[in-house]
Image (tube, rainbow, N blue to C red):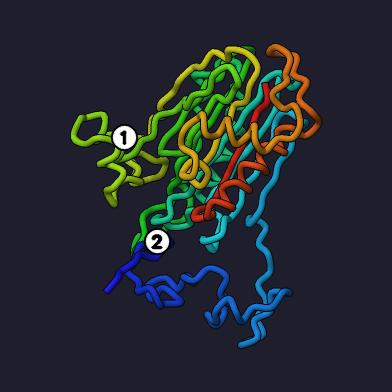
């Protein structure tokens, strides 16, 4: 007998279960949220022919933020999850000379994971906007503030879930330096025709066993623990001090922050570079030197949408969030 896990609470469920018996979460994507009728019972207007219930689109199913042509992002519920537990925040300060990006992915096994992601993203972004003049100190303050805010979310510890928690990756870009902090496996990439790379290192079981020489990467990827994270932002985190790197921006390109809903389908920086090149029918790579970008109007939002669409077309198994800064 195949045993699966509820994506919300982690309880064991059977393949034919429509609802989780522990937390009531609907288990079959596209089914009626009220009676559990199959997707074949849902008409084009979203009405269930079995009980008449109509599912209204939720505000967080699709989030989009555009700040000028060079800074934008998209968060999408994906095709398999019933709620979007991702969130992101963007901001420009210092007369638009300093850019801030924050992307969070609520931990599914925790309580109110969607609220944890939103609270962390918004509080970290606000702190970075206030303390941007000292980027590394600002990053530490932002994570500390986000931790306090997430820890203050109401949590009844008699529930069969962990305290509210989330992964987080944040970038503060000032002059020609991107200061990047993270906890968990949400990532930052530098994408450029002259050289792309991953800027963050996952806080994950896979990364640790490979680094320790206990397994090869191929062996570790076969393990059911491969996607387990070892660090996160939440009241139950053993160590919530962020990893921080300062990346000197080498020229024109794109700073990309994303959740695993995207990078699970394209983990290598070169793969993401190719997707952007393939999905763009304009000259998004035809940028002038740093400080004088000439990307077409809406380049950042166009790239964000195309990457989310790529993940959906690849299966959309998880929530998908992408934030892009054109430089």
Q: At 47% from the left edge and 25% from the top edge, which residue is drawn? A: 199
Quarter of the picture holding the C terminus? top right
Q: Nearer the viewer, mark 1 or mark 2?
A: 1
Q: Residue 178 — which label?
A: none
> As rendered, which of 45 and 105 lies closer to the eye?
45
Label 1 – label 2 distance at C-alpha: 32 Å
Q: Is residue 124 visible to the viewer in this orientation of the structure? A: no
Q: Position of residue 208 (x, y in %)?
A: 27, 34
Q: At 53% from the left edge and 31% from the top edge, which residue is drawn? A: 170
> As rendered, which of 261 and 72 lies closer to the eye?
261
Tell me: 234 left or right of 224.
right
Q: Position of residue 58 (x, y in %)?
A: 65, 62
Tell me: 166 left or right of 124.
left
Question: Is 83 situated above or below 145?
Answer: below
Question: Is 61 situated above or below 1?
Answer: above
Q: Is residue 175 visible to the viewer in this orientation of the structure? A: yes
Tell me: 268 left or right of 12.
right
Q: At 39% from the left edge and 53% from the top edge, which residue is drawn? A: 163
Mark toward the start of the polypeptide (1 vs 2): 2
Check whether the beta carbons of the residues at disc 1 and disc 2 lie within 8 A of each other. no
Figure label count:
2
Say what secondary structure mark 1 lies in. Answer: helix
Q: Which residue is mark 2?
A: 156
Q: Position of residue 94 (x, y in %)?
A: 71, 19
Say what secondary structure mark 2 lies in. Answer: loop
Q: Which residue is mark 1?
A: 207
Q: Position of residue 45 (x, y in %)?
A: 73, 74
Quarter of the picture holding the N terminus? bottom left
The residue furthest left is 214
Q: At 62% from the left edge and 13% from the top edge, which residue is drawn? A: 251
Quadrant for residue 16, please give it.
bottom left
């Amino acid at each position: 007998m195949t045993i699966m896990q509820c994506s919300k609470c982690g309880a064991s469920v059977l393949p034919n279960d429509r609802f989780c018996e522990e937390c009531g979460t609907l288990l079959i994507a596209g089914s009626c949220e009220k009676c559990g009728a199959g997707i074949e019972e849902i008409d084009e207007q979203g009405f269930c022919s079995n009980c008449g219930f109509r599912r209204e689109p939720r505000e967080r199913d699709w989030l989009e933020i555009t700040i000028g042509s060079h800074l934008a992002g998209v968060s999408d519920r994906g095709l398999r999850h019933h709620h979007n537990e991702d969130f992101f925040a963007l901001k420009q300060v210092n007369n638009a000379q300093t850019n801030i990006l924050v992307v969070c992915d609520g931990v599914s096994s925790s309580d109110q994971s969607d609220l944890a992601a939103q609270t962390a993203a918004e509080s970290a972004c606000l702190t970075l906007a206030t303390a941007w003049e000292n980027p590394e100190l600002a990053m530490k303050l932002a994570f500390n503030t986000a931790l306090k805010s997430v820890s203050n979310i109401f949590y009844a510890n008699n529930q069969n879930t962990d305290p509210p928690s989330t992964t987080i990756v944040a970038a503060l870009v000032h002059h020609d330096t991107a200061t990047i902090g993270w906890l968990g496996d949400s990532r930052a990439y530098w994408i450029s025709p002259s050289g792309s790379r991953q800027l963050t290192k996952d806080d994950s079981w896979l990364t640790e066993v490979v680094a320790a020489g206990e397994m090869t990467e191929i062996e570790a990827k076969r393990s059911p623990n491969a996607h387990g994270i070892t660090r996160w932002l939440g009241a139950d985190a053993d160590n919530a001090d962020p990893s921080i790197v300062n990346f000197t921006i080498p020229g024109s390109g794109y700073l990309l922050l994303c959740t695993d809903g995207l990078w699970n389908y394209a983990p290598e920086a070169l793969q993401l570079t190719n997707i952007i090149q393939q999905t763009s029918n304009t000259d998004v790579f035809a940028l002038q030197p740093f400080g004088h970008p000439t990307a077409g109007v809406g380049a950042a939002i166009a790239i964000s949408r195309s990457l989310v669409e790529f993940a959906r077309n690849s299966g959309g198994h998880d929530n998908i969030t992408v934030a892009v800064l054109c430089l």
